[in-house]
Image (spheres, rainbow, N blue to C red):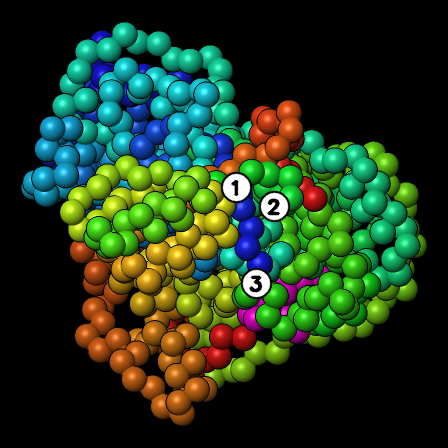
Amino acid sequence: MERHVLSVLVENQSGVLSRVSGLFSRRGYNIESLSVGVTEDPGVSRMTIVVDGDSYILEQIKKQLNKLIDVIKVIELDKNKSVFRELMLIKVNARENTRASIIEIVDIFRASVVDVSTETLTIELTGDEDKIEAFVNLMKPYGIREIVRTGLTALERGSKEIKSYKKYEED
Amino acid sequence: MKAAEAIVKFLKEEGVDTVFGYPGGYIINVYEALRKSGIRHILVRQESAAAHSANGYARVSGKTGVCISTSGPGATNLITGIATAYMDSIPLVVITGQVPSSMIGRDVFQEADITGATESFTKYNYLVKDANDLPQIFREAFHIASTGRPGPVLIDIPNDIQTEDIQYYYPETVHINGYKPTVKGHMGQIKRALKAIVESEKPLILAGGGVNLARAQDELLTFSEKSGIPVVHTLMGKGAFPSNHPHYVGMIGTHGFSYANEAVKMADLVIFIGARIADRAAGGTQIMPENMKIVHIDVDPAEIGKIVGTHIPLVGDLREILRDMNGMITPKDTSKWLETLKSLKTEETYRTGSLVNPKKAIRLLSKKLSDTAIMVADVGQNLFWAARNFEDLPGRKFMTSGGMGTMGYGIPAAVGAKIAAPERQVIAVTGDGGFQMSMNELGTIAANNLDLKIVLFNNSNLGMVREMQKKVFGHTSQTALIGNPDFQMLAKAYGISGIRVQSDDELESAFDQALNHRGPFLVECIVDPDESTL
């Protein structure tokens, strides 16, 4: 089983998310995360889907996604040639005696504190999975109250765009 | 113009002259427009039959079948028919009424989320939110249903939208960003396939239902004749190649002929043409890329490599690809290979008992039928009695619910077939189980005085399940159809003539009587429940 990151252009209309997620559950593919948002073209959305699977499964996923009428293009993003980012909001216990040390870690990670209360700090962090995991591990001793993550979102490095890829037909 | 009137006009623009349906509260506006339109409406007796009839109509006419129902239970009754069409890639446009837009999501009377429910077995579906989108939606729906790999498309139309006023237009062209099916085959791949043929010693064509869907029978015939390559086929590929041709080997699969399966095992190159090679077809053939070279030609790239690995994938419209290949192919001497295959063939022997032998019956009937006859088989033992004994002469047609295996498909599909081709003989073959799932359609047959013949193999049992239970468990359970009606009296109640046949000796005159009779006719054959499928 390998982890793959797919970038998928879809029509920005209702029912698309259900069609895509339905396809994964129906055919028994494992989906690790899915993030979606509108693109430079308001009629088009872009999904970043992280999936687990061997080469056969990946091939099937790509083909079945391409078969969906609402899917415009599917590409797989190479880890080494792409920027992977995720945003996390994390609420940790922070009292007077621990607040400073937490903020020190926040600075090291170039995260930012977005909310403070007498008992907690809420921190915003952007990064790839490793960075986020590392940060979470460092927060554990303080007591994590809540975590929310957007799921991975990704873009290929360099000047190439998803639109410049040919429509998938046959390999 | 009222949206409902526009909808009916769109249907006319698409060349629709017949629709199958069942009216109801949230579709009456469309029905009112339909009434004035001149489009023929066939009132079925339950909605799933509307989808099956539209399916049969589509397969015979080559056009997109259209069926209509109301919201809620009307729509959910269609579901089996939609899934059946989806599995066999039959082009349908399914129109359902929906509760008024403002009520959606409130679980009001006769509300069902039909777009959600059919998401996984429609090629695409629409819930109309703005009446002004209707022209685009209908144009797209017919385009999606009928191009590429065909399939059912559903349009769910809330009642209030049907009565809105819209500016009438019908788009000339259709452009869907994410939908551009490949038509022409990749020339490099075609050359590779042709080279593989040259290099092979025992090549074999494996034709599937895609050949029938693409109407590429003539091209396949030319391909086989020019190349010298013999042909086996799947159940859905029945009729893709004439069974009286010297290159014809037979039907493969778990319920096919062992010599046809044997042929696949012996081949060093197998060319799949429009075949999915699903479990039932692949069973008994040991199709594996390790054992043979595989060329897979299909319009749907997702089918290639899904079940069986492929050496040479070739995506596009089968007709186009075969035409291209036919123009470039070099003839091959396959006489030795053909000889070998011929020597494998065995004549079927029939058990003779006191009751009707269904295999013999179909064989006899097949001899009596015209060269353009259509046989529609239901599901169960009757399907394989029919499929294994109906001769695929050029111009004939055989159809069944191959993918879904839907009992009750036979009679309503035959209704659609007869309406599509009134001049052709249409025979529905069914068992007493399948018959009772659709016998209400005798009403549709009687109302339209459809000249179709029903061959009912009555063993008072669910024969196929019974056979399976006996094999697996050594006994049977819940398969005896106790309480079966007198089918002759039942037919008579609808004003339909018929005859009950108790032995093989009576078959000849019974079939003659049926075929000479003008109007619907029921030939009921009494069959021993121990009669085997194969």
- In magenta, the rendered stretch is B247-258
Is label 3 in a helix, a strand or a loop? loop
Q: Identify the image quadrant of the N terminus of chain B.
A: top left
Q: Tag 3, which chain?
A: A
Foreground mark, 3 or 1, reads 1
Mark drawn on residue A84? 1
**Farthest residue toward the left?**
B109
Do the residues at pointers 2 and 3 share their chain? yes
Q: Are marks 2 and 1 on the same chain?
A: yes
Residue on which the image places disc 2: A79
Q: Nearer the viewer, mark 2 or mark 3?
A: 2
Name the amino acid type tagged 2: Lys
Helix, strand or loop at label 1? It is strand
Quarter holding the C terminus of chain B is bottom right
Q: How many numbered marks are there? A: 3
Taking depth in this image into account, of B257 and B246 the one nearest to the observer is: B257
Q: Which residue is mark 3?
A: A1
Q: Earlier in the sequence, mark 2 or mark 1?
A: 2
Q: CA distance from mark 3 to mark 1?
A: 20 Å
| Residue B213 is at least partly visible in this image | no
Would residue B119 appear left or right of B359 to someone viewing this image? left
Q: Amino acid at mark 1?
A: Phe
